[in-house]
Structures are given as structure tokens and as C-alpha cells.
Image (spheres, rainbow, N blue to C red):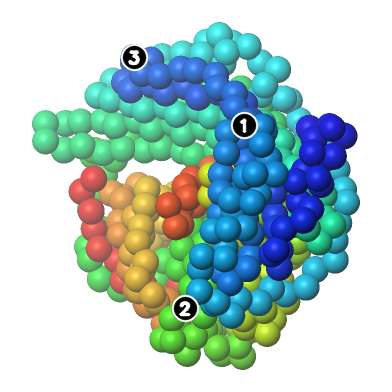
Amino acid sequence: MDDDLRDRIEDALKGHDARLIEVRVEQGEGTHIRYRGKELDEIGHTTGVGGCIRALAGGWGFASFNGLEGLKEKVATAVRNAHLVSDKGINLAPVDPVVDSVPPLMGKDPLSIPLQDKKALLDQYVDIIWSVPQITTSTIGYGDGRRKRVFATSEGTYIQQEKIDVSLRLNAMARDGGDVQQSGVSLGSNGDFSFVEQLHDDAGELAQRAVDLIKAPQAKGGEYTVVLDPVLAGVFIHEAFGHLSEADHVYEDQRLRDMMKMGRRFGGPHINVVDGAAVPSLRGSYKYDDEGVPATRTSLLKEGVLVGRLHSRETAATMGETPTGNARAISSQFPPIVRMTNTFIEPGSATFEDIISDIKEGLYVCNWYGGMTSMEQFTFSAGEAYAIRIGKVEELMRPVLLSGNLFTTMQNLDAIANDLDMNQGGGCGKGGQSPLPVSNGSPHIRIQKCLIGGTSS
């Protein structure tokens, strides 16, 4: 990643018949450690160099590589592929060429920690989890990586950008006969290993929670007033609303275009939703996307009204809107597609105590295990639930399923607290590219008439 590489790339870009040529070269290294139960299942450190070329002529042509030899010929291959495609009428929103070098955000560098020290730390978490009686299995997954990317175009852009990512998942399961319950936590950071060293209490608490869930009562199915913690509320806004804001989904589907029409009211004036890589210091943060477009902070819902969506250069031109810097590729083996970055509900003015104070009977739902969406319909599994009675959070309940219609649910979202928190433990999947580092978050939120189904595991 030096001046010689820049010279080679700029030379390789010359003399081709294409409207646009992009070259991405990626150098990466990383660590992965996996435990199943008490046993170490997988451990390793990997390094690699690769890249790709994307060319636009009649349509897009793509070529990937794992070595830098013959770069000009690889560019010519991508251009030939682009000419083989019948004219798709593809347009790109204009962006100014950029020359820049972006260093990584640095905390405690995970790549500076010896592999044996990382394993020794995770061994401690395994021991803590298994010290809790009735734990029958556990999983731990750790990963880190440093990625240096060079992005250059025939328009004159040349960007060097480096990013470090860290993620950790702890999960414990308890059993009583045929009854199995689990509890877990997913965490991550944009370049700082420190959080991995501070989870001894968390490991013990999640193991004990799995055991406590065995004895916890089951909530009856039905409609409840529910309060979502920042983790589950962040997953809700990412899955149920964020994916509907990705412009490639919108312009490819007439029903979705009608549904996500600018100016449509989704909820009350207290609801504001944002996505943007320009929100600093999070796992989804960066300075430029994988088309060289500067990161932005995009307002999606403003005072309950749809005012924005997420774009690549192509989708922005197609819909007559402005690029938002949301074109992302999980690696150099894939072309960039429209993806979320850091998606969240902005804080309101109420406290947590305010929004539960007038609930006579409801549920406080926290954490998450998974979920699914189909257009405006969603179903999510909370990791844990607590009864709310007469304005107070009471006993632990079995995990529950939350389901509903996005539009009805947003109308019933009637209170937002002032305690925004971002969850950085997730990875987003789309178009075969997973898990892409993102973050999502929210303050505590209250939803009236939310449909709840009990679940036993």
C-alpha cells in the first residue's frame, strides 16, 4: 500500500473503453477463536491480499483477483465483461474525485495482543460460565481484523482507508429435563480490544440468567404495552425499518416504492430515525464508502415523516436523489451494494421511569436472539422479558416473540426515553454478503398494543 502501488493502479486504469473503472485492493489480517462447550473448537490467524475491478460500459463488468500481477489485464477483463452486457441504461450520480489517506480509529489494538493471551482470556470466560450449576452448553465466538483498502477510479479518486474491527459473542444454555433456556450477549468495537477484557461479571450474569429462565413464568400471548430496551429497539429499527430504507430494494419493487413514498407519515412527531457512517467511532463508521462517496448522516424519519433513504451512486441517479455514502462490500470478492451503517432512533426527553410510570400491566423486553421481516411484517425474539406492574419492573419472564405490522407499530410507538445506547455486536446480511459490521441503537421506547407470543426456548 505505497506509492509504487498507486503508480501501478493508475497505469492499469489508462487506455480502456469504459464509462467508469474502479479498482479495489485489500490487505487484511485477523484472528478468530471459537469454543463449543468447554472445548476450543477453532483458533487461527489469517492474512491475505486480494482485490477486484468493476467497470461500467453497457452494464457492470466485474473481476476479482488474489494477486497484483497483471493488473492492467485484469482491468481489461472487467471492461470486456461490461461490454458483454446489453445496455442497461445505468446512470451514476456525480461525485467529486477524492485523494485521501484515512488511518484507523485506534484504542487498544487487538492485533498487538498475542493469540495465546486472547485464548487465555476467553478460557476465563468459559470457566466462569461453567461454574454456574445447570449450565449444559455454551458457545463463545471472538473475531478481530485489520483491513487496509485502496480504492481508485478512472475519474481520479485515490483513497487509502484502514479499519480495525473487534467482535465477541458469549452464550450459555441451561437445561432441566427437556426444558432448555439460553442467555447471551453480542458486543463489538471499532478498533478497541479493551471491552473484551472487562466481561467477567457479564459472563457469570448471563449464565445465571439462563438458569433463572428455567424457573421463570411464561407470559400469556396477547396485546401488551411493551417497553423495549435499547438493544432490542435498535434491532427493531434496523430490521423492520432500516432495510425498507435501502434504495435498491425500493426502486426494484413497485409495492415498496408505493409504501416508502417520501412525505409519508409513519408515526408521531417525537420519532426521528437516522443512519450514517459519519456518526463517529462506531462499527459502521467510516470516512468513505466503497464507491469513494463521503460518509453522511442521513435523516430517514424526521418528526415521524419519511424524508430520506440510503443510496449508492446508481440508486441515487435512478431515483433523482443524492448519494448518501451507503455502498458497501464485505470484501474485495464482492461488488458494493446499498447497506446500512449506524442506524438508530434519536433520543427523546423522557426518562425510563417516566415511560413505565403509568403502565398498569405490561412487559419490559430486552436483548434479542433473532427475527425476520417480510415487507412491513416483522417477528422478533426477545432475549428476556420482565413483568411491569403499576409502573415498576418486576419478575423475570420467559423470552417472548414480538410481531406486528411496521406501520401500525410505529403509530403505536408513543414514548421515547433520553437514554440512547448503541449496540455494536451485530452483523448484517444481504445479497450473500454477511456479516457486515454495523451498529444500531435506540433509547428505551414504549409501544402500545404490541402483539406478544410466548416462547419456551
Mark 3–mark 2 Cα distance, whole angstroms, equals 47 Å
From the viewer's perspective, is the residue at label 2 or at label 1 nearer? 1
> Alpha-carbon distance for marks 2 and 1?
35 Å
Q: How busy is the neighbourhood of tag 1: few (under 14 within 10 Å), some, or many (20 plus)?
A: few
Q: Secondary structure at mark 1?
A: loop
Q: Position of residue 337 (x, y in %)?
A: 56, 61
Name the secondary structure under disc 3. strand
Amino acid carrying label 3: it is Glu
Residue position marked by numbered label 2 in the rendering: 252
Task: State left or right for residue 101 relative to residue 191.
Answer: right
The quadrant in which residue 59 appears is bottom right
Q: Amino acid at mark 1?
A: Gly
**Residue 39: assigned label:** 3
The mark lying in front, picked from 1 and 3, is 1
Residue type at mark 2 is: Glu
Q: Are marks 1 and 3 in contact (CB under 8 Å)?
A: no
Query: Where is residue 204 drawn, in percent x and y?
Result: 44, 25
Q: Note whether residue 247 is visible.
A: no
Quadrant where the image shows the N terminus: top right
Q: Is residue 397 left or right of residue 303?
A: left
- N-term mark: 2 or 1: 1
The residue closer to the viewer here, 351 or 46, is 46
Query: Can you say whether 253 is above or below 185 in the image?
Result: below
Gap in Å between the C-alphas at discs 1 and 3? 37 Å
Identify residue for label 1.
67
Please report the residue visible at 77 percent of the width from the left and 56 percent of the height from the top: 15
Closer to us: 77 or 244: 77
Question: Are circles 3 and 2 on residues that touch, CB within 8 Å?
Answer: no
- State the image quarter where residue 105 is shown: top right
Question: In the visual, does 163 lie left or right of 52?
Answer: right
